[in-house]
Image (tube, grey):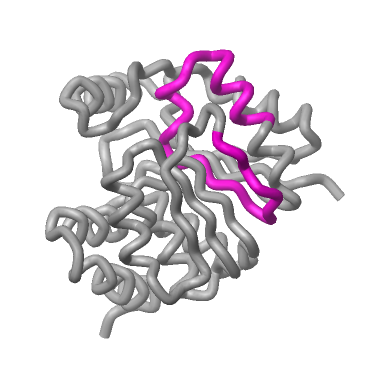
Amino acid sequence: APSPFEAAVERVASRYAAGRRSAFHYARGKMMGDPVVRRVWELAAEEPLGEVSDIGSGRGQLGILLLESGGAMRVAGFDWDGAKVRDAARAAEGLAASFEEGDLRSHEIAPCDTTLLIDVLHYLTDEEQDALLVRSARAAKRTVLIRDLDPDRGWRSAMTRAQEAVTTSLRYNRGARVRVRPIACIERVLEAEGFEVRVEPCWGATPFANVLVVGRRKG
């Protein structure tokens, strides 16, 4: 029998089946294979994330998974890739979710309980990263969840940089650059905005150097 996580993934994947086949295969493979999906799902099972702003939401599979499994009350996502936004909106029909096309450097982040920034910061300049972190922190009443590349994990970091450079050069990811900074830069901004921060390895069985930064608002 499938685990509760696997059953939720299959329910969400079925929502993409009526759209582009590439979106279906991507969403299902991403949910099953990416360690951050399971980890965020686990955190939401321990303590629901409430109203969620998914910044750089892509095809929306993580937010939809949270809704399908009761880990979120509402999800508002935006991304600068219109095709991915359309995939997300189609898959989210009937759920308390909305997905819009927008530049994460300027798009409004509505007040919410939780903000998600999954693999988006390193496509921005240092100044843009800090500005987005501040806006995300101020929008979140309780939690900020960030997954990004840690440049200080040796061979894992080199492997991840190479993979990101390839996907960006092929325009699979629409970021203009790959600008990786120490994870301490993220921690400092969140702490200055009133969050307690911890960093978890989030690479699972992959060769990459991804970590999950969990910020919880003090008090």
Residue 202: % across, % down: 42, 43
Q: Quadrant of the N terminus?
A: bottom left
Residue 174: % across, % down: 30, 29
- Residue closest to the eye, 175 or 80: 80
Does the segment drawn in magenta span residue 117?
yes
Task: Magenta stretch: give its range.
Answer: 107-134
The residue located at (33%, 39%) in the rendering is 81
Q: Is residue 166 left or right of residue 102?
A: left
Q: Which residue extends farthest bottom? A: 1
- Where, by quadrant of the figure, is residue 120 drawn? top left
The residue located at (64%, 64%) in the rendering is 50
Query: Relative to 208, is 202 above or below?
Result: below
Residue 199: % across, % down: 57, 38
- Residue closest to the eye, 210 or 174: 174
The residue located at (36%, 46%) in the rendering is 58
Q: Is residue 38 left or right of residue 159?
A: right
Asked whether residue 200 is in view, the answer is no
Q: Is residue 102 left or right of residue 16?
A: right
